[in-house]
Amino acid sequence: MPHAVGVSLAAKMDKKDIVSFVTLGEGSSNQGDFHEGLNFAGVHKLPVITMVENNKYAISVPLKKQLACEQVSDRAKGYGMPGITVDGNDPLAVYDVVKQARERGISGEGPTLIEAITDRYTAHSSDDDDRLYREKGEVEAAKKKDALQSFAVYLRDTGVLTDEKEEALHKEVEQIVNDATDYAEQAPYAEPEDALKYVYEEV
Ligand SMILES: Cc1ncc(C[n+]2csc(CCOP(=O)(O)OP(=O)(O)O)c2C)c(N)n1
Ligand SMILES: [Mg+2]
């Protein structure tokens, strides 16, 4: 949040057509940075879009124990910006609200908070056993709404996606991921002094 808001402040000062975009989990939206960032962005009408992916759990903590209000988007009011809740499993609906938020940012109207409702199909990490805090049925039901599946069906129905295109796409994605993995695994460790970079202006 602080970085995204800082980038949008720089864009406004430099009169550049930039809208910054930041995503975080709903659990992260309960921490200080989120609120300071939104407040600063709201006060200064900065071109930043904040998207909270609300999958209803912060590791094992359910939404009811995270928020005192109903929705994450309700918090936008306190920071003087629109707060929109969208079905995060519907790519076209998400595209629509992000596009509108971008137009707001570009035209100088300021920031937008978007809450995309979605689901987590696995435990938080390999250290987390989600059978301890949620029913198996809940996860099974959520998987049926997986946008990767439902959007693929939609694209097939509308004739956009074919077997050949899907295979080519998977190959391309696999290649990109493999290349990035190789690049990262072969990259040298950062120099310790690098930790001091980009904090203070270097004169
Ligand atoms: C500043 C900070 N505080 C606490 C943690 C420990 N922590 C890691 S993930 C997490 C919960 C994140 O919840 P959410 O953003 O909803 O992500 P999800 O569990 O849905 O993946 C916490 C508290 C952390 N990584 N950093
Ligand atoms: Mg979460």
Image (cartoon, grey):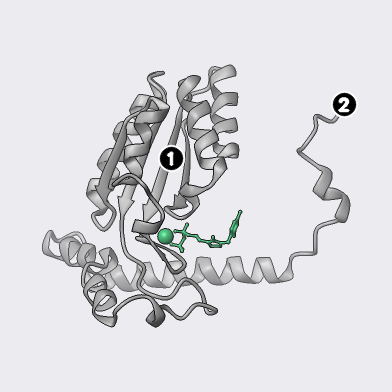
Please identify the quarter of the rendering in which residue 57 is found: bottom left
- The residue closer to the viewer here, 179 or 79, is 79
Tell me, yes or no, whether the two marked residues, 1 and 2, touch with CB atoms within 8 Å. Answer: no
Note whether 9 is above or below 166 in the view shown.
above
Please identify the quarter of the rendering in which residue 186 is found: bottom right
Please identify the quarter of the rendering in which residue 139 is found: bottom left
Confirm whether residue 60 shows in the render: yes
- Mark 1 nearby-residue class (10 Å; few <14, some 14–19, many ≥20): many
Q: Residue at x 33, y 74 (%)?
A: 167
- The residue closer to the viewer here, 39 or 50, is 39
Q: Amino acid at mark 1?
A: Thr
Confirm whether residue 18 shows in the render: no
Q: Position of residue 124 (x, y in %)?
A: 47, 71
Horizontal side of 167 relative to 87 (left or right) equals right
Horizontal side of 29 relative to 186 (left or right) equals left
Q: Position of residue 185 (x, y in %)?
A: 69, 71
Q: Amino acid at mark 2?
A: Val
Horizontal side of 155 relative to 179 (left or right) equals left
In this rendering, the count of numbered labels is 2
Q: Position of residue 135 (x, y in %)?
A: 29, 79
Label 1: which secondary element: strand
Which residue appears farthest toward the left when viewing the image? Answer: 157
- The residue closer to the viewer here, 42 or 180, is 42
Q: Quadrant of ligand 2?
A: bottom left
| Residue depth check, mark 1 versus mark 2: number of the one nearer the observer | 1
Q: Which mark is residue 203?
A: 2
Note whether 201 is above or below 147 in the view shown.
above
Label 2: which secondary element: loop
Q: Which mark is residue 50?
A: 1
Horizontal side of 38 relative to 153 (left or right) equals right
